[in-house]
Amino acid sequence: MAAGALPVFFQHPLGESCVAVPDRSTTVLSSVLEAVGNTPCIELQRVPKLLGLKCRVVAKCEFLNPGGSVKDRIGRLMLLDAEREGLLKPGDELIEPTSGNTGIGLSMAAAAKGYKMTITMPTKMSAEKERALNALGAKVIRTPMVDFDHPDSLISVAWRMQKEHPETRHVLDQYKNSGNPNAHYYGTGEEIFRQTGGKVDMVVMGTGTGGTMTGVAKRLKEKIPGVQVVGVDPVGSILADPAKPPPPGFSYHVEGIGYDFIPHVCERGLVDVWVKSEDAESFKYARMIQRHEGLLVGGSSGSAFAGVVAAAKDLGPEHTVVVVFPDSIRNYMAKFADDNWMVEKGFSDLITEERRALGGVVKPTYEALEKENGAMKAKIAALEAELAARK
Ligand SMILES: Cc1ncc(COP(=O)(O)O)c(C=O)c1O
């Protein structure tokens, strides 16, 4: 262990580098990988009060990881585990199906270590994520929004490419890789325990692969008897209730959470309460957290906060709720961070008067454009009729 390294609280079965990073306040780090994790827990001072919540709400600020999300943790650990297992040779290529953030975390690790990287990512995910991936040297293959087992899905395409060159291409596979929940069991969950001194009554997390939920829930349930685990799942996903699939073609805008299958790493039994989240409340709360707490979070942080509002409404001031904020506004600068996108997607009523006064809304709504279009068509028809009458 390097001089000045943090104590190792839990030994990873394959080594200790996932948790034993040097103390950055007293040393120079050897690579970006040592800057992953140890994110701050910040008490929310204003938004819970504005919404009438009485309990103490603490945000685990995963968006402050160097690659911008909670997924930097699994990108680092899955790659280090693969190296320890002797799976990777210099110049090998990693291929990963992802909604983007795992891709960024893995590509960051691959860039620091010198591996090639290809990402398969559905068309829904933001252009900002693709730009970040490109900056890290990753090739991005966009896949259609189809069922996970469709031959064109992000998962099928990644595995098909891997099978073409099995000696040099590897899918570390966040849906199955134990490094995914382990990164949160030894990292995120353990950090929350230490940062709060174990005073946690409820922990609220969005679920995508379920790796964050599984790792954090396992660690905290071991250490804090009676802690409540709240899983947040968007309307349109089956994670909360696999027996209730959404109507065909149903989609939602929030990125990174929800699936149409249950990932292997997702231990649903660890969740005590499921909350279903909707786009509008997710964007409303994410914007409130940005504006009133100064935390530049992404949309799924708003979904997680919707989970707090629903599950913690009856808790008193003696209770502490920890909510995980997975990624940042950076991924959504041209999406929900942009008032014009909000107008286009039908969320104009979430734009506050204060925001409107800043003059950011420049695009007319689709409805307004359609009205204008209709009026123009009517005018042309009238002119044509006039012309025809003159002949
Ligand atoms: C923005 C965002 N929020 C939440 C999650 C959920 O994380 P997990 O896959 O650990 O359930 C993800 C995962 O990609 C994400 O990208």
Image: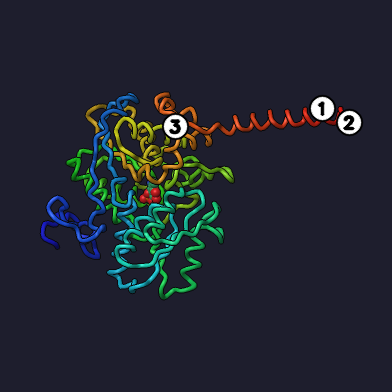
Q: Is residue 179 above or below residue 337?
A: below
Q: Earlier in the sequence, mark 2 or mark 1?
A: 1
Tell me residue 203's x, y (percent).
30, 40
Q: From where the camera sits, is residue 302 visible?
A: yes
Dot 3: few (<14), some (14–19), or many (≥20) neighbours within 10 Å? few
Dot 1: few (<14), some (14–19), or many (≥20) neighbours within 10 Å? few
Tell me residue 244's x, y (percent).
52, 43
Among the 4 quarters of the image, the one containing residue 201: top left
Residue drawn 23% across the image and 57% down it? 34
In space, the residues marked 2 and 1 are separated at their CA atoms by 9 Å
Q: Earlier in the sequence, mark 1 or mark 3?
A: 3
Q: Secondary structure at mark 2?
A: loop
Identify the disc placed on residue 360: 3
Residue at image mark 1:
386
Q: Are marks 1 and 3 in contact (CB under 8 Å)?
A: no
Tell me residue 121's x, y (percent).
47, 55
Q: Looking at numbered disc 3 in the image, what kind of residue is underneath it?
A: Gly
Q: Looking at numbered disc 2 in the image, what kind of residue is underneath it?
A: Lys
Q: Looking at numbered disc 1 in the image, what kind of residue is underneath it?
A: Glu
Identify the disc placed on residue 391: 2
Q: Residue furthest front?
A: 390
Q: Earlier in the sequence, mark 3 or mark 2?
A: 3
Single out the mark in the foreground, 1 or 3. 1
What colour scheme does the image use? rainbow
